Image (spheres, rainbow, N blue to C red):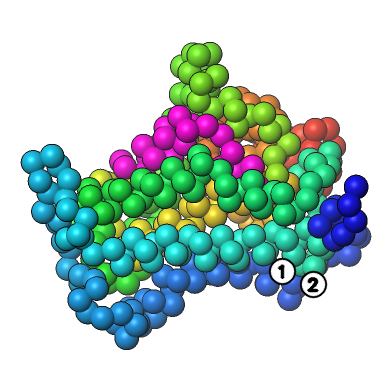
Amino acid sequence: AAEGVDQKEPVATSESPTWSMTLVTWLLWPLICTLPLCLTWGETAYRSVFPESWYDEVPVTPERSSYGMADPRTVKPLGLILGLLAVVVGQFFMIWYHYLRRCIMLGNVKRVQPQIRDYLFAEGLKTHLSNPEGFVLLGGYLIGSWMLGWMPSTYYSFSGGINWKHVAAQLLLQDMIQCFMHLGEHKISTWVYQNSHKPHHRFTNPRLFDAFDGSLVDTICMILVPLVIVARLVPANVWSYMTFGTLYANWLVLIHSEFVHPWDEVFRKLGFGTAADHHVHHRLFVYNYGHLFMYWDWALGTYRDPRSLAGKQFSKDL
C-alpha cells in the first residue's frame, strides 16, 4: 500500500478532548451557515455587496408561459447562485472537519462501529463529490425550479433576513416526509425496495462519504419530492431557504460519519439524529427511518437506541 497520512486510520486515545477542542468542533454548525449569516448581518449586509437590480426585496412571481415555465432570462439568478454557493461553503468546512478528526487533530475520536473501513481520504472525497444521485440531480432540481419560476413567490424575496422558525419548520417537515418515504421504500414491496433504496444499504458500516451514494429513484423519492412539498408549505424567503439547504445537505452527510461527533450526546437528548442513530438503520435495516430527527421513530415505535448495541455490533460507551 502507498504510504502517507492519507491512509492512516485514526487510533482512539484515552485523552479526553479539551474544552477548547470541543468548542472548535461545535463551531462547525455556524460555519456551515457562513454565507447566509454573513450576507444577512444586520439583515441588509447584502445590499452593500450586490447591485439593487440583481435581487428583489419583495416576493416575486415570475411570469410563466402557457407551458408553465418562465423564461430563464427574466428570472434573477442571484438567489440561486448564493444558495448553491452556501452549500459548497458548508461542504468545505464539513469536509475539513472530517479530515482533521480523521487525523486526530481535533481531539480523541471513537468509531460508531468497531470494524475499520480503510480508505484513502482522497478516494472518499472524489466518490462523494462525483455522486450523480447527490449533487448532480439535486443541483439540477434547484436550478430548474428556480430559473423556470416554479418556486413560491416568497422564495425570491431578499428582505427579512433569516427566519429561524421557517428554517426549523423546513428541517422538521423535510425530515418527516423523508422518513415516511423512507419507510415506504422499505415496506411497500420487495420490488420497490430493490429498485430504490437497496443500493444505499450495501453500506452496513457507512463512512461519511457514503451519504449520497444510492440510486436516482431513491434521491427523487426521499429528497426531491419532500423538497417540492416543503416549499409549498413554508413561506420562507431566500435566506431561510438557503440556511435550511446548507444545514440539511451537511447534516445528511454528518450522520453517515464513521465517528461519533462531539455534539452527539446533546443531540440525542434533544431527539436530533446522530451518526450512531443512522448506523443502527444501516446495520439492522428496520429501525430509525428518520434522519435529522428521531421524533417520527419514537411515534412509530421504530426507534432503536444505538447504546443497546454497544459492545455488540457497535463500539462500547457510545
Q: From mark 2 to mark 1, how far is it between C-alphas?
A: 6 Å
In the rendered image, residue 210 lying in the magenta stretch gets the answer: yes
Image label count: 2
Q: Which residue is mark 1?
A: 22
Using the rendered view, name the quadrant where residue 17 is placed.
bottom right
Question: In the rendered image of this protein, does residue 296 appear above or below residue 72?
Answer: above
Give left or right: position of 154 versus 266.
left
Bounds of the magenta span? 209-229
Please name the residue shown 11% across and 54% down the image. 63
- Check disc 2 and report its element: helix, strand or loop: loop
Please name the residue shown 49% across and 71% down the image. 34
- Check disc 1 and report its element: helix, strand or loop: helix
Residue 149's spot in the image, x, y percent?
Answer: 21, 52
Question: In the rendered image of this protein, does residue 179 appear above or below residue 102?
Answer: above
Prevailing secondary structure class for the magenta stretch in the rendered image:
helix
Q: Amino acid at mark 2?
A: Thr
Q: Give 205 or 72, whichever is nearer the viewer.
A: 72
Q: Which residue is mark 2?
A: 18
Question: In the rendered image of this protein, does residue 251 appear above or below residue 281?
Answer: below
Using the rendered view, name the quadrant where residue 24 is placed.
bottom right
Q: Residues within 10 Å of mark 1 (few under 14, many from 20)?
A: some
